[in-house]
Image (cartoon, rainbow, N blue to C red):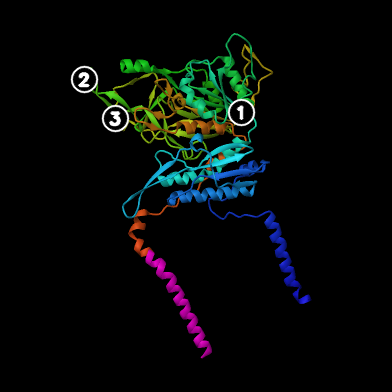
Amino acid sequence: MRKYAPYIFIVGLFLCLYGVLYERPVRWDLTDDKRYSLSEASKSLLRQTDAPIEVTLLLDGDLNAGFRRLKKATEETIEELAVYSDLKVVKDYKDNKDSLGLRPIVIHEREQNGKTAQTTVYPYAIMRYKGRRAVVKLLNNTRGMSGEENLNASIEQLEFAFMEALHLLQQTETPRVAILEGHGEPDEAHTYDLMAALSKYFQVDRGAISDQSSVVSSHILDGYKAIIVASPQTAFSDAERFIIDQYIMRGGAVLWALNGVQLSEQVLQREGFTPILPLELGLTDLLFRYGVRVNPALIQDIQCLPIPVNVSSDPQQPNLQPMPWTYAPLLLTSQGSPITKNVGQVMSTFVSPIDAVGGDDGIEKRVLLATSTASRVTATPGEVDLNEMNPDVSSFKYQYVPVAVSLEGSFASAYAHRMVPEGVESDGIIKQGEKTRQVVIGSGSVLINEVQKGQALPMGYDRYSGMQFSNRDVIVNAILWLTDADGLISLREKSVALRLLNDKRAHDERAKVQTVSVVTPIAVLALIGGLVWIIRKRKYE
């Protein structure tokens, strides 16, 4: 019996180890980009669930190679989520997809025989938790990106998409955000899409900080996760600036969408030109203290939107032709921020450049939006002229001019060495704030929607060209980033390496690859068999 003791010990140890790992499996992700690993924020959110989660994957049917890869990645993500929660996959989904706003994607592909095949797919998943339901959008479809790039971006965002849906399902209270009014901001019709986009996540309120007729508390904004300063046209009072400053000091977050210049678009349309002057909002000292400055200038960019221009000399027979309008630049998005990663171009008009100031002030600053490689800056005072449709390209010498930045850190108060303004009820001045976040955009046009025949158009929709840009995604991501206490928005920074085949080389060398793939295994087996035969023959002769 003693001689079998080592074997019994090994078998017993193996069974114990198997029992432990069966109850709590250990997983190792050996991929370079950690594509099979969940973040700590996701694990924490999953562990907070106290009821089963049901997931139905609608992406099914006769899929092409790209969508099969997306489906496989989705299934792997669901499997990883199930490790940290009571998650079940439900196969059948019998509810009306159209009632949930699930629009199918029609894929047209050319087969090898030259015929065109059409496939309809639903790139969605349905998540249920405690009787509530959320739609998980699986496909990222960004304008300007190829099909393979969009599929890869979709795979990168799978964890965020599922965690965002679960976070919404777990919420017991709807957080609030506020759009400030009282300074000539756009009305509700021109910010309708902004409010509609944010209403999925927040209760959106509108209102002025004060009416200048009574004393207001410096804590009036404390109930809001974030406030939005959307394209004001008149100056803020000293009391309003103080209230915003102290709101930031207490950890409040702000999205600033500010114009650096004032001009009249009505005069421009009527006269063909308009003067531009600095727009004095009274916010320069606040923003400078926080580490940023919106310059009183306008950017022109070769990469821009066209506008219809009447090129006919006969007023009775107008001839509208699209002409490039350099004051409407198409802004590039940074891949170095969760706000703008995998997001397409942003439409804008009359944009002002932004400078980072303050040096080593401990504030983390990231550029979110910038111009193209051919830009120029028009200083104030100056003028905008409709006759500048074909400017000298050689004068566009600036590259990647920042027009939107994010700020994160502990900000210093602009009122650290000043008195509390009149009309404000305050219990003192906070000189150094809690850690918080801000986003500053050098144009209010980014979050404004047009109104056509009484109907609000989406943010970023150009009605002349019919193109939809990514303004909505950038603004929603910015507010989610500003209010993200759990770190979920950082999941958008996850990267999966895109390893694509060279289609031309694969087609040209197809016969060669097939031959090598078929012949090589047979040749290797024949060689091994021959060597074994020779060795055996020599051994037993």
The boundaries of the magenta stretch are 514-541
- Dominant SS of magenta comes to helix
Q: Quickly name the residue at label 1.
A: 175
Which tag is nearer the camera, tag 2 or tag 3? Answer: 2
Q: Quickly name the residue at label 3.
A: 392
Mark yes or no: residue 34 visible. no
Q: Amino acid at mark 3?
A: Asp
* Chain-order first, disc 2 or disc 1: 1
Residue at the far right: name it.
Answer: 2
Circle 1 Cα neighbour tier, 10 Å, few/some/many (<14 / 14–19 / ≥20): some
In this view, the residue in front, 22 or 93, is 93
Residue 22 position by quadrant: bottom right
Residue 377 position by quadrant: top left
Provide residue 522's location: percent of width, then percent of height: 43, 72
Q: Quickly name the residue at label 2.
A: 313
- What residue is drawn where x is 35% and y is 61%? 510
Residue at the far front: name it.
Answer: 94
Q: Amino acid at mark 1?
A: Pro
In this view, the residue in front, 150 or 486, is 150
Provide residue 324's location: percent of width, then percent of height: 31, 29
